[in-house]
């Protein structure tokens, strides 16, 4: 064996490599699951003789015992696989055929399972035996005992085991078996790697597909335009409330201008406070760091109640009316001196003029105050609406900027995750391809050793020496005649 092939065998099949470098034990180790009858078969083979039988320890040949009561399962296959690692030849036997007349379908099923799942075996040797029949044959003795012994299949099993021991102790035969076993191990690994081509990256590919199918994050539409409209409606409603309240104040005849200014200022302060509170509650402006306070504003000065041209005209008209009224009052008294009549006329003219001027001045001043109140309310409404628009535009700009920043961050994370997934998928695929290439290189090293020329598949169904799998030792015509003769004894 070349150095390269020896190194490949040592890495892939350390048990086989140890068998090649250690003398093979020319004995048969009997193994079996609990209840398979391995102990009874071991004792019976020891009684028959012709081959060394052990239950433990190293051996060139392993005899795996199955029971005819049921088809082999996972436990039996795992035992067979573990046994094949330490033995050059493996022989399988089915016991208890005397207790189960319908053992042939069980045997056929077992052989089929071994062909499908025991690919690590170079060949499958499967023999049915009856330990009870062999014991009875030894007790009977003679020709009848010899026939029963053949019918039990023990002698055939002994011959097969002896041939297997001879083949296993042959150096070239052992080397071919180890190399073939190692080659199958490498090919199984390559098949597993190719079969798992999508399994180890399935989760990563599924995550990548989910990311590709999910919609890109979009900038959410802000609700601030709706909030802006609602706040403007609140401002209009508050101003209408102030108008109604100030109408009552202005209709009060005893109310002076200073009282009107104080009432208007108080109402407007309340309106400002409520508008600020509404903005803060609907937009979380405090949490967002937006200044939601209103600038201080003062009312314009009250209109001056000074004399005007209307007052002078009113005074002239009032004096004329008063003089006429006085003259009218003294007309019935013709004997009154003229000086007294003039005094009466003047006495009526002066109070009438004063009263008319006073009434006209109050009415004019109230009208000027009313116009002043309307102007102040219009100014306050315009300032509040401008303030609401300014603050909501600031909040909207901030919200759009934050949403766009979050959108950019999510897009960047998505792109980074795509790159990480692609890198991981590429790494796993590269590792798998590298392992497959290494397996192919190891197979080439074994092929160059010149020891893989034996037909593993053509010899798969044979016993040691190239014989086919023996279904039973009891189906020939001669054995049937001998069985009939034994039954007549």
Image (spheres, grey):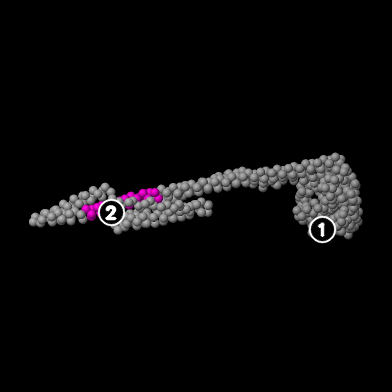
Residue 432, image x, y percentages: 74, 44
Which quarter of the picture shows residue 429? top right
Describe residue 473's horizontal placement relative to residue 205 as left or right: right
Residue nearest the viewer, comparing 39 with 427: 427
Residue nearest the viewer, comparing 94 with 262: 262
Q: Does any portion of residue 295 appear in the rendered image?
A: yes
| Gap between marks 1 and 2 measured at Cα | 131 Å
User: Label 2, on which residue?
Assistant: 362
Describe residue 432's horizontal placement relative to residue 297 as left or right: right
Start-end of magenta stretch:
353-380
What's the magenta bit mostly, secondary-structure-wise?
helix
**Callout 1 secondary element:** loop
Quarter of the picture containing the N terminus is top right
Residue nearest the viewer, comparing 135 with 415: 415
Q: Does any portion of residue 477 appear in the rendered image?
A: no
User: Label 1, on which residue?
Assistant: 37
């Amino acid at each position: 064996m070349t150095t390269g092939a020896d190194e490949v065998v040592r890495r892939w099949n350390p048990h086989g490599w140890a068998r090649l470098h250690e003398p093979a034990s020319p004995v048969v180790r009997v193994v079996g699951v609990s209840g398979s009858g391995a102990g009874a078969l071991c004792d019976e083979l020891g009684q028959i003789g012709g081959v060394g039988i052990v239950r433990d320890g190293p051996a060139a040949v392993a005899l795996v015992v199955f029971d005819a009561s049921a088809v082999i399962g996972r436990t039996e296959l795992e035992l067979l696989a573990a046994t094949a690692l330490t033995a050059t030849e493996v022989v399988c036997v089915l016991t208890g055929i005397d207790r189960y007349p319908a053992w042939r379908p069980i045997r056929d099923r077992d052989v089929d399972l071994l062909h499908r799942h025991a690919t690590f075996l170079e060949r499958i040797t499967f023999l049915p035996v009856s330990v009870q029949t062999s014991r009875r044959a030894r007790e009977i003795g003679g020709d009848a005992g010899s026939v029963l012994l053949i019918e039990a299949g023990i002698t055939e099993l002994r011959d097969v085991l002896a041939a297997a021991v001879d083949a296993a102790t042959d150096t070239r035969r052992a080397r071919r078996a180890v190399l073939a076993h190692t080659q199958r191990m490498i090919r199984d690994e390559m098949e597993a790697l190719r079969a798992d081509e999508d399994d180890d990256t399935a989760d990563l590919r599924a995550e990548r597909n989910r990311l590709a199918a999910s919609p890109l994050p979009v900038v959410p539409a802000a609700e601030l335009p709706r909030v802006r409209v609602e706040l403007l409606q609140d401002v209009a409603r508050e101003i209408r409330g102030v108008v109604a309240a100030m109408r009552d104040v202005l209709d009060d005849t005893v109310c002076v201008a200073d009282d009107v200014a104080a009432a208007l200022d108080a109402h407007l302060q309340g309106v400002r406070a409520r508008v600020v509170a509404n903005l803060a509650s609907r937009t979380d402006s405090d949490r967002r760091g937006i200044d939601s306070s209103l600038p201080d504003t003062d009312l314009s000065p009250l209109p001056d109640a000074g004399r005007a041209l209307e007052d002078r005209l009113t005074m002239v008209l009032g004096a004329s009316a008063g003089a006429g009224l006085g003259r009218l009052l003294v007309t019935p008294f013709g004997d009154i001196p003229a000086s007294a009549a003039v005094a009466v006329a003047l006495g009526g003219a002066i109070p009438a003029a004063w009263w008319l001027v006073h009434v006209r001045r109050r009415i004019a001043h109230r009208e000027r105050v009313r116009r002043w109140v309307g102007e102040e309310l219009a100014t306050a409404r315009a300032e509040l609406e401008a303030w609401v628009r300014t603050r909501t535009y600031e909040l909207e700009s901030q919200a759009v900027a934050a949403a766009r920043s979050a959108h950019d961050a999510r897009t960047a994370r998505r792109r980074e995750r795509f790159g990480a997934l692609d890198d991981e998928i590429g790494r796993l695929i590269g590792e798998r391809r590298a392992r497959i290439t290494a397996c192919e290189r190891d197979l080439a090293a074994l092929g160059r050793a010149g020891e893989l020329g034996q037909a593993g598949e053509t010899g798969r169904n044979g016993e040691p020496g190239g014989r086919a799998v023996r279904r039973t030792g009891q189906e020939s015509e001669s054995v049937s005649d001998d069985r009939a003769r034994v039954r007549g004894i």
